[in-house]
Image (spheres, rainbow, N blue to C red):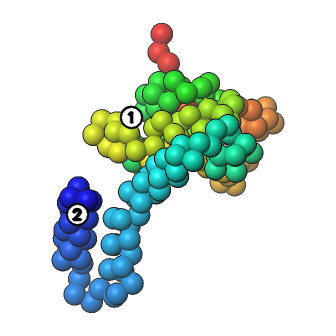
Amino acid sequence: MHAVLVVLGAIICIFFQRCLQQPSRVKLHRVLHLFCSCVDKMNITKEIQRINAAEQKRGITGLNSSWHNDYKDTSWVFVGSLPKKLTEGDIICVFSQWGEIEDIHLVRDEDTGESKGFAFIKYEDWRSTVLAVDNFNGTSLLGRVLRVDHSRYERPKLKKDEEEQLSLLDKAALQQPGHAYHAGGRNKIEIEA
């Protein structure tokens, strides 16, 4: 209970620090949004842990009776709160321990190319997503607490000018595993010999 109060106190301190940095004409909904954004990130992680603990306590075994079964139609997971210095290769190294990774999309800033700190990973088998969510959600990686959850992710659509520049072979390749990111090559993993 004491740890919960300490965490809540820290969240409230961050909330008020952010409020003081805002102009005096801040509207109530903006203040509430700031507070909720601080609290929401940990709530999702804790909720997944709570659901898993409840299933374990009730003795629920097998994927057919688990909450994970709702996501058997997708092999994608969302990974949030990643350290920005990690590359696609680093993320693959860490997350491949739960199964064969078929695709990855590390979301980057379009102008700078810097990681935004979250990614979408597609496993070859959807059961690997269960292992990744159960084992990585709430764990710490380079001092950051990861949020890992199931996702019904779809590959981002290309801009019209990018799509026009693609050959038919490039368009077909985008439908194959390993191409969640655009064909321009900026986000592709390159291995040096």
Earlier in the chain: of badge 2 and badge 1, it is 2
Secondary structure beneath label 2: helix
Where does the image place residue 164, in percent across and percent down from the top left? Answer: 73, 47
Where does the image place residue 90, in percent across and percent down from the top left? Answer: 43, 28
79 lies above or below 39: above
In which quadrant is the N terminus drawn?
bottom left
Where does the image place residue 172, in percent across and percent down from the top left? Answer: 79, 35
Closest to the observer: 148 or 61?
61
Closest to the observer: 154 or 109?
154
At 39% from the left edge and 84% from the top edge, which residue is drawn? 29
Q: On residue 5, which mark appears? A: 2
Could you tell me how far apart the alpha carbons at marks 2 and 1 are, in whole angstroms?
Answer: 32 Å
In terms of image quadrants, where is residue 74? top right
Q: In the rendered structure, are the residues bearing label 2 and label 1 in contact, judged by CB atoms less than 8 Å apart?
A: no
At 65% from the left edge and 29% from the top edge, which residue is drawn? 102
At 65% from the left edge and 46% from the top edge, which residue is drawn? 66
The residue mark sitting in front, 2 or 1, is: 2
In terms of image quadrants, where is residue 143? top left
In terms of image quadrants, where is residue 160? bottom right
Total labels drawn: 2
- Mark 1 packing: few (<14 Cα in 10 Å), some, or many (20+)? few
Q: Is residue 144 left or right of residue 122?
A: left
Q: Is residue 186 left or right of residue 123?
A: left
At 62% from the left edge and 43% from the top edge, which residue is drawn? 60
- Amino acid carrying label 2: it is Leu
What residue does disc 1 label?
A: 86
Residue lying farthest top? Answer: 193
